[in-house]
Image (cartoon, helix red, strand yellow):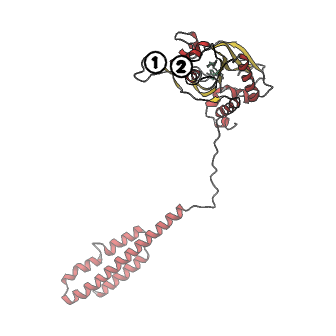
Amino acid sequence: MNEQINELKKEALDSLASVANRAELDAWRVRYLGKKSRLQAILKSLSSLPVEQRKTIGAETNRLKNELENLLKEKEAAFEEASSRAQSSRDALDVTLPGRPSTLGRLHPVTRVLQELQEIFASMGFEVVEGPEVEWDYYNFEALNIPKEHPARDSMQTFWVEAPSGDDDREMLLRTHTSPMQIRVMEKQEPPLRIIVPGRVFRYEATDATHIPMFHQVEGLAVDKGITMADLKGTLYEFSRRFFGPERRVRFRCDFFPFVEPGVEMAVECAVCKGKGCRLCGQSGWIEILGAGMVHPRVLEAGGIDPQVYSGFAFGMGIERIPLLRYSIDDIRLFYSSDLRFLRQF
Ligand code: FA5
């Protein structure tokens, strides 16, 4: 019996020496320590042996069992360590690899133009204020001398919005221009006033090379004693000189807006064709960038300002058309097509 045990030990140790992975180790465990192993068979057979033999063989077999179990644990621990070493070397940082280049973002051309405009007007003493994009009909139309059924409403196709419950008697919309802020500012501040209002506006319009349904405007408003049309023209000429340069020609023509009297539009010579006429300017050589005029007395009154004492000028400039003119871009829709080949040029 002793010989059998020694043979079994030699075989188990030899076999363990060639175990190379966890699966093989498991097979080894089943073979030499499992329920159907020879070791278990010896232990079972002990009861049939005479007492003396049972003692010595029993002790011998148990020693072998303990030894094999310890070897199994050691081998398991060795596999465990090897696998965590392999994992940490996979996670290690290879400092010799070239770094990933970080892509630098940049400001959208419309944002840059807005910032530049704000700087120009701020240097002329205008304060920047912002207003709500969702507006009441009252501020967008009524208080600006555009009552319901007024034909001027047709020129600003409107996105109407459901008013919050409890406000069923008032109509809500996405503002079609930044002019509602004229009233909101006059309601809150006393003259003298000099403000500009940059912001997004919305119109339910078909798109073409110079029209999009969401665009930006900058509103300007100056109210004080003795403000005249000369102040309006002087301010806008100065803006054009600083923004487009002194060579670019500017044109003022009469125009109608219910909230100014008299009203004008200002156009700038087309940058693409230099005034000769092209697709962008509709063959006219000019691109209209803003509407303006002297604030209508009814609008001053709606803002709580006495038109007998004060006068003012206002203008509303379309922002997207300005970089068109500066960079000779022939389609306004490019600004919002998210085409990086276009946007990276600015
Ligand atoms: C107005 O919105 C008036 N509130 C401007 C104003 C303010 C007049 C104060 C008098 C006093 P108008 O609808 O013309 O006016 O728009 C002003 C400018 O916005 C236009 O000159 C044009 O540059 C730009 N614009 C108008 N519609 C679009 C559009 N669909 N896409 C891009 N730009 C537009």
Residue 230 located left or right of residue 81:
right
Quarter of the image that includes the N terminus? bottom left
- Tell me the residue at 57%/61% (across/down): 93
Nearer to me, 128 or 186: 186
* Residue 340, position as x, y percentages in the image: 64, 37
Disc 2 to disc 1, how far (Cα)?
11 Å
Q: Amino acid at mark 2?
A: Tyr
Q: Quadrant of the C terminus?
A: top right
- What residue is at 64 percent from the left and 33 percent from the top? 111
* Name of the residue lying farthest toward the right: 247
Q: Is residue 284 visible?
A: no
Residue 5 found in image quarter? bottom left
Q: Nearer the viewer, residue 186 or 246?
A: 186
**Do tag 2 and tag 1 residues touch (Cβ < 8 Å)?**
no
Looking at the rendered structure, the number of numbered marks drawn on it comes to 2
Label 1's element? loop
Seen in the picture, residue 82 relative to 250 is either above or below; the reply is below
The three-letter amino acid code for the residue at tag 1 is Arg
**Which badge, 2 or 1, comes first in the chain's sequence?**
2
From the image, tell me which residue sits under label 2: 139
Report the disc number at residue 170.
Answer: 1
Q: Residues within 10 Å of mark 2 (few under 14, many from 20)?
A: many
